[in-house]
């Protein structure tokens, strides 16, 4: 076990609330020992793209969320399994997921904005 794994502290409920605010994760909630968020998409292919994106970044970080896909909804739940609680890793991965899933090109850039609803919620 590396030193960083050994030194990870499990957050108290008050610390979780503060960290969600600190990381700008206002759409994430804390419940039953997890932080979680639901993404609503326009269709099944978009939901599947979200799951694949989360899977890629989670594998790269070696930190694996619970993911539920149901029609056009994707529910992401995070906790640090080997600590059986919420740690700094969960907030960092949640922030990265938000940045990737909600990314939109700048109007003045070389890309066109997706005219569809894409992702909400």
Image: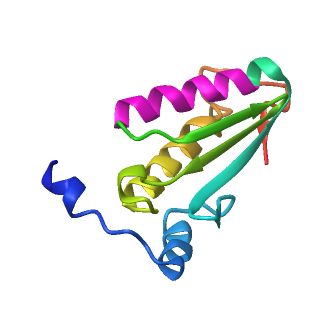
Q: How many marks?
A: 0
When asked about the image quadrant of residue 40, the answer is: top right
Viewer can see residue 49: yes
When asked about the image quadrant of residue 24, the answer is: bottom right
Vertical side of 7 occupied by 100: above or below: above
| Residue 49 point in image, percent of width and height | 66, 22
- Is 94 on the left or on the right of 102, as rendered? left
The reply to whether the magenta stretch includes residue 54 is yes
| Residue 48 point in image, percent of width and height | 70, 22
Viewer can see residue 103: no
What coloring was used for the rendering?
Answer: rainbow
| Residue 58 point in image, percent of width and height | 45, 35
Vertical side of 36 occupied by 31: above or below: below
What span is colored magenta in the figure? 47-61
Taking the spot 65% from the left edge, 59% from the top edge, the residue there is 28
- 42 or 75: nearer the eye? 75
- 86 or 101: nearer the eye? 86
Vertical side of 63 occupied by 95: above or below: below
- Is 112 on the left or on the right of 1, as rendered? right
In the image as oriented, which residue stretches furthest toward the bottom? 14
- Is 16 on the left or on the right of 110, as rendered? left
Taking the spot 55% from the left edge, 32% from the top edge, the residue there is 54
- 76 or 20: nearer the eye? 76
Vertical side of 36 occupied by 52: above or below: above
Taking the spot 56% from the left edge, 71% from the top edge, the residue there is 21
Predominant SS of the magenta segment: helix
| Residue 65 point in image, percent of width and height | 52, 42
The reply to whether the magenta stretch includes residue 51 is yes
């Amino acid at each position: 076990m590396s030193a960083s794994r050994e030194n990870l502290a499990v957050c108290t409920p008050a610390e979780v609330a503060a960290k969600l605010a600190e990381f700008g994760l206002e759409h994430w909630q804390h419940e039953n020992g997890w932080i979680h968020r639901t993404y609503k998409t326009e269709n099944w292919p978009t939901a599947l793209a979200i799951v694949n994106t989360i899977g890629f970044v989670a594998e790269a970080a070696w930190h694996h969320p619970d993911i539920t896909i149901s029609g056009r909804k994707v529910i992401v739940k995070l906790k640090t399994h080997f600590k059986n609680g919420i740690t700094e890793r969960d907030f960092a991965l949640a922030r990265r997921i938000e940045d990737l899933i909600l990314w939109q090109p700048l109007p003045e850039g070389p890309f066109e904005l997706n005219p569809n609803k894409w992702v909400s919620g």
